[in-house]
């Protein structure tokens, strides 16, 4: 899969699965933008992380396990895409 297409799909998935359609336009999310934390515009929380993890598993067949590992993988669109590429 093309890297740009994968990242586009991940941004769309994030906005849809985390119910952020009213707050965010997927096209405005930078690949390296932090998804968690005070500096994050996205402001994902633990429930969002769980929803996104399950959606990634369902769509791409890779499993994100553990809170510490999940936080690292779900840090940005870039890190999620890298995990998917290495997991498939």
Image (cartoon, grey):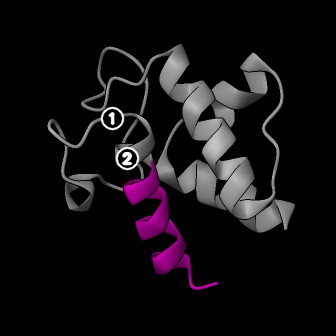
Residue found farthest to the left: 22
Q: Position of residue 4 (x, y in %)?
A: 46, 78
The answer to whether any part of residue 58 appears in the image is: yes
Q: Quadrant of the C terminus?
A: bottom right
Question: Dot 1 corresponds to which residue?
Answer: 19
Q: Where is residue 46 in the image (x, y as percent from the top left)?
A: 54, 15
Q: Does the magenta stretch include residue 42?
A: no
The answer to whether any part of residue 74 appears in the image is: no
Q: In this view, does 83 lie above or below 46?
A: below
Numbered circle sitting on residue 84: none
| In the image: residue 51, left or right of residue 21 | right
Camera-nearest residue between 77 and 25: 25
**Dot 2 crowding, Cα within 10 Å, few <14, some 14–19, many 20+:** some
Camera-nearest residue between 37 and 6: 6
- Give the magenta-colored segment's residue range: 1-13
Residue name at image x 40 percent, y 17 percent: 37
Q: In which quarter of the image is the N terminus?
A: bottom right
* Mark 2 element type: helix
Residue name at image x 82 percent, y 63 percent: 86
Question: Dot 2 corresponds to which residue?
Answer: 16
| In the image: residue 69, left or right of residue 1 | right
Q: In this view, does 88 lie above or below 48?
A: below
């Amino acid at each position: 899969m093309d890297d740009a297409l994968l990242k586009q799909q991940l941004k769309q998935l994030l906005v849809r699965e985390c119910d952020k359609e009213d707050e965010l336009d997927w096209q405005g999310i930078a690949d390296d933008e932090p998804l968690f934390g005070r500096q994050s515009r996205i402001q994902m929380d633990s429930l969002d992380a769980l929803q996104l993890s399950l959606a990634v598993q369902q769509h791409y067949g890779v499993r994100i396990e553990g809170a510490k590992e999940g936080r690292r993988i779900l840090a940005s669109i870039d890190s999620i895409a890298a995990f998917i590429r290495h997991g498939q």
